[in-house]
Amino acid sequence: MSPPTQDPKRLRRRRIEAGLNKRELARAAGIHPSYVTWLERGERGASPRVLKRLSEALKCEVADLMPELDDEAGAA
């Protein structure tokens, strides 16, 4: 299993802030509700196309759904 491309916690937080349940987000993004569950659990990674559709449904930027960059990774 490949690591998730999105940050599951950030995706869930954005969905809740948007006032959507998983089924509503799935419908708005054109994906299956189970897929939203898997993404929020970190069990699957979203493709760039799905990330774009999720960001449009959530009215945010794709970067808002991605893991934060670790500043310490570049410093050594």
Image (spheres, rainbow, N blue to C red):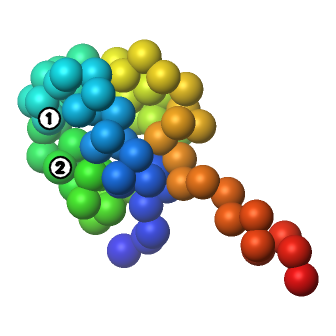
| Image marks 2 and 1: residues in contact by CB distance under 8 Å | yes
Residue 45 vs 30, above or below: the answer is below
55 to the left or right of 31: right
Residue 40 vs 3, above or below: the answer is above
5 to the left or right of 15: right
Residue 37: mark? 2
Instruction: Determine which quarter of the picture holds residue 55.
Output: top left
- How would you rate the neighbour count of disc 1 (Cα within 10 Å): few for under 14, some for 14-19, many for 20 or more? some
Residue 7 vs 33, above or below: the answer is below
Q: How many marks?
A: 2
Residue 49 visible in the current orientation: no
Q: Residue at point 47% right, 41% down?
A: 65
Look at label 2 and name its amino acid.
Thr
Mark 2 and mark 1: Cα distance apart in space: 7 Å
- Point out residue 33 in the picture as x, y percentages from the top left corner: 13, 38
Identify the image quadrant of the C terminus.
Answer: bottom right
Q: Earlier in the sequence, mark 2 or mark 1?
A: 1
Residue 52 visible in the current orientation: yes
Q: Residue at point 68% right, 65% down?
A: 70
- How would you rate the neighbour count of disc 2 (Cα within 10 Å): few for under 14, some for 14-19, many for 20 or more? some
41 or 72: nearer the viewer:
72
Element assignment for label 1: helix
Q: Residue at point 14% right, 35% down?
A: 22
Look at label 1 and name its amino acid.
Lys
Instruction: Determine which quarter of the picture holds residue 1.
Output: bottom left
Instruction: Determine which quarter of the picture holds residue 44.
Output: bottom left
Point out the residue furthest to the right here. 76
- Point out residue 61 in the picture as x, y percentages from the top left corner: 55, 26
Task: Read off the residue under disc 1.
Answer: 22
Element assignment for label 2: helix
- Point out residue 50 in the picture as x, y percentages from the top left corner: 41, 35
Residue 61: mark? none
